[in-house]
Image (cartoon, helix red, strand yellow):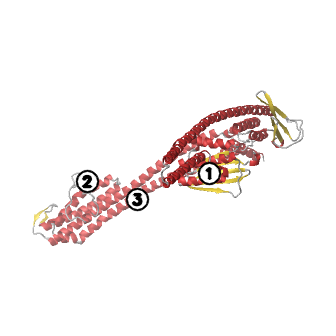
Amino acid sequence: MIATDYTGSERRSSARDWKNMRISLFTNFFLIIIVLGLGLLIFLSSQALGTLDHITKAERQKYRSLQLANELFQSSEDLTKTARSYVATGDPIYERFFFEILDIRNGKRPRPPNYSINYWKNVRRPPVQSALVDPVSLMELMRREGFSERELELLQQAQEVSDNLVNLEKQAFAAMKGLYDNGHGNFTVPRAPDRDFAIKLLFDEHYTDEKARIMVPISRFMLELDHRTQTRLSNLQSEFQQQMLLILALLCTALLLVAVATFYVRRNILRPLEYLRRQASSIAQGSYSTRCDISSHNEIAELGAGFNTMAEAIEHEITKLKQVEGSLRERLKEIRCFYAIRRGMEAGSLEEVCRTIFVQLTAAMQFPDITIIRIELDGKQFVSHQDDRDHTHGLRKQIVVYGRAYGWIAVFYREDQPFLLPEEQNLIDVIGNDLGKWLEHKQAEERILVEQELRVRDAAMREFAAHLERMREEDRKYIARELHDELGQLLAALQLEISLLKGGEGNGKGRVEAIRRNLSELVDKADQSMRDVAEHLRPASLELGIISALKKLTDEFRKHSGVTCVLQLKEAPIDLDEDQTVTIFRIVQESLTNIARHAEASRVDINLLQRAGNLIVEVRDNGKGFDFTSAVTKKSFGLLGMRERAAALGGSIDINSRPQQGTVVCVRMPLKRNKEI
């Protein structure tokens, strides 16, 4: 029982040690294992590749050895075939093939390119010798391939049997040529060629038995070769399998280490980091009291401790920032209030400025929902909300304009509460001072504008008076010209007719009648001339009222200009005094004159109507229009005279015109009954 507890305690201690292992130590340890494992894996892989290369070389050597053994057997077959072909046909080409095959096998002639066991099956002529290849015998090639002594001995036996067959084949060749054995193995005894004897030598049972004897050592060679190469291949393959098993064991160990490292990283690194991330996100979302509790004692735990220190510092700073933010928010409300009120003072009227103060100052107060503001300026009061109760608590600031008390501004709550704050009193003081300065600036601007308007109006009146004087002088010239030219000529003609009448008293009655008619015509012309002068100075139609005068004016305008002119009148009668009648007539007359001179219009509409105690006269054309601002700056006395005429009787005139869009002249004049004059 005690041993069991001790073992469990050791396991828990080992787990704690594993959990508390520092990340840097684990990383270095794991890195060393990875480097050693990779080195061992590379070494085993190179050994396995070397073994595989040895297996490949052994397979190739076995293949080449089999080729050489087959070449020995095939060369014997090719020698038999060429020898039999020669004795059967007598063609010397087969004899030549025979000796070339024999010389290549014995190393007396170089091997042709691509020399194989099937080479002589497709050859129809002797092969071309290559000077670049050294002749090598078949046995030498077998020694170079590393054949064992037993294998070389068996191949030597096969070649000796093949050489015995060669001797029989040479004896058959000599019999074909008439040469026979001299008893010492040399074919020098001449006789008659015996082809049948040659054929018997190569086709009898003895030759066939010798051919069969060649295969006995070759078959044994094949068994020896197969045993030797197979044993080596088996050894190499076994070695390769052992190396691959070691590589697989190493890979499995590496996978196990990766699994252990993954478990360690997930448990001691990733999970604590994820926990830290969640805690950091909680702080980022505003939960500044969040802290980390990591039980391990590695770098992550140190990071958690640093995180807790940082969180405490952030919480402390956030608390301070909230306090500063509250103070700044109040100051910002005051600044916005100042800015908005001063912006409203730039171009607003007194009522608009007071409304701006009500809105902005109410929003800047501590309790805006129950705030009431009162402003009194020069006896005139402005109130944000109606409240007739008296309040004991409030903020008040006197408004001073040019050193004189001009009014006051007061702020209080509907509910009497002590709310007086120094910042709010300072705010109201600043607003009261700004309002006083704005009133001073406004009064100064009004004085400047009045002075400028008076100066401009005075200059315009002087210019207009000079213009009227010039017009009077023009009228005098017109009257003098009419009197001198028209009436002078008529009077001279009358004087001539009278002298003719005096000098022709003795003439007949017809002559007197003719002179009388001439005198009557001259008197009529003189009367018409006087009427034209009087009409020019003051149209007689004005005595009949404004409607008759305008009808006659539009008729004459259509007659002289050719422009369509439509006069639209209301059915109700229009009763004007003499000054109003003359003023409206002259304004319409000036408008028609400007249209005829400048507008290039094809239609003019004149409307007269009464509305709300005012007479409205509108003259509208479809001409090319003009730039009204430019016309004013050019000091157009026609437009100036129209304005002055309307203003003299308490009326107004509005002129709207744009280039290529026509012109509208609208006169608004208050009606005044004749009996009130």
Q: Nearer the viewer, residue 474 or 518?
A: 518
Left/right of residue 638 with respect to residue 134 in the rendered view: right
Can you say which quadrant of the picture contains the C terminus?
Answer: top right
* Residue 646 at x, y percent in the picture: 67, 44
Q: Nearer the viewer, residue 370 or 674?
A: 674
Of the residues shown, which amino acid type is indicated by label 3?
Answer: His
Q: Are marks 2 and 1 in contact (CB under 8 Å)?
A: no
Q: Nearer the viewer, residue 499 or 649?
A: 499
Of the residues shown, which amino acid type is indicated by label 1?
Answer: Val
Q: Quadrant of residue 411?
A: top right
How many numbered badges does the structure rendering display? 3
Badge 3: how crowded within 10 Å, few (<14), some, or many (20+)? few
Q: CA distance from mark 1 to mark 3?
A: 134 Å
- Pick out the residue farthest to the front: 506
Q: Nearer the viewer, residue 72 or 621?
A: 621
Secondary element at image label 3 = helix
Residue that mark 2 sits on:
136
Q: Which mark is residue 227?
A: 3
Of the residues shown, which amino acid type is indicated by label 2?
Answer: Val
Residue that mark 1 sits on:
619
Left/right of residue 518 with respect to residue 589 in the rendered view: left
Q: Is residue 150 above or below residue 216?
A: above
